[in-house]
Image: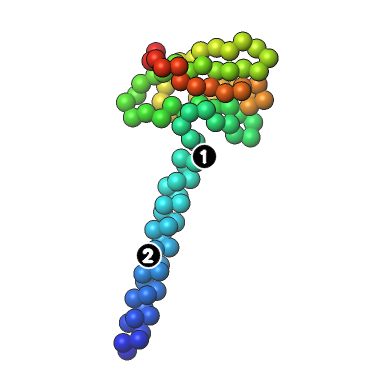
Amino acid sequence: MRIRRMVTSALSSAALVLTSLGAVTAAASPAAANPCGFYETGSDAMYNHCTSDGSQIVIKVEVAWAADYERCVGPGNTWLGSASKIQGAHYVGRTC
């Protein structure tokens, strides 16, 4: 009887740990998929403005074989164009 309680307790603890690890992995996945700042998917160039205050910022978009330009972006993801045409983007230090 005592051994059964010990085994049941150990299995419950292991299940709790594995469930917690699964929740952490699930919570981390969206952040990894959409990091803050410039990132590329397989075919798209994106900028993710991570903010909780609703601000809009100016970013400089670096374009291959064309003039770079500035763009005002709000919170969340903004599509910048094809990953083959956009080389990068960064915050220029001011709001819009």
Seen in the image, is 80 located left or right of residue 6? Answer: right
Q: Residue at x 34, y 24 (%)?
A: 54
Q: Identify the residue at horizontal 44%, vertical 56% (top origin).
A: 22
- Image-based side of 82 in relation to 49, left or right: right
Q: Residue 96, image x and y in percent?
A: 39, 13
For residue 93, above or below residue 27: above
State the image quarter where residue 10 is shown: bottom left
- Hey, which residue is sitting farthest bottom in the picture? 1
Q: Is residue 56 left or right of residue 40?
A: left
Which quadrant of the view contains residue 85? top right
Report helix, strand or loop for mark 2.
helix
Query: How packed is label 1: few (under 14 Cα within 10 Å), some, or many (20 or more)?
Result: few
User: Which is more N-terminal, label 2 or label 1?
Assistant: 2
Q: Is residue 57 left or right of residue 47?
A: left
Q: Mark 1 = which residue?
A: 33
Query: Disc 1 residue type?
Result: Ala
The residue located at (40%, 69%) in the rendering is: 14
Q: Residue 51: x and y, percent?
A: 37, 28
At label 2, which amino acid type do we have?
Leu
Q: CA distance from mark 1 to mark 2?
A: 26 Å
Mark 1 and mark 2 residues within 8 Å of each other at the beta carbon? no
Task: Tell me which residue sits at (38%, 80%) in the image.
Answer: 7
Q: Which label was assigned to residue 16?
A: 2
Residue 64 image offset from top left, x and y in percent: 66, 18
* Residue 83: image tag: none
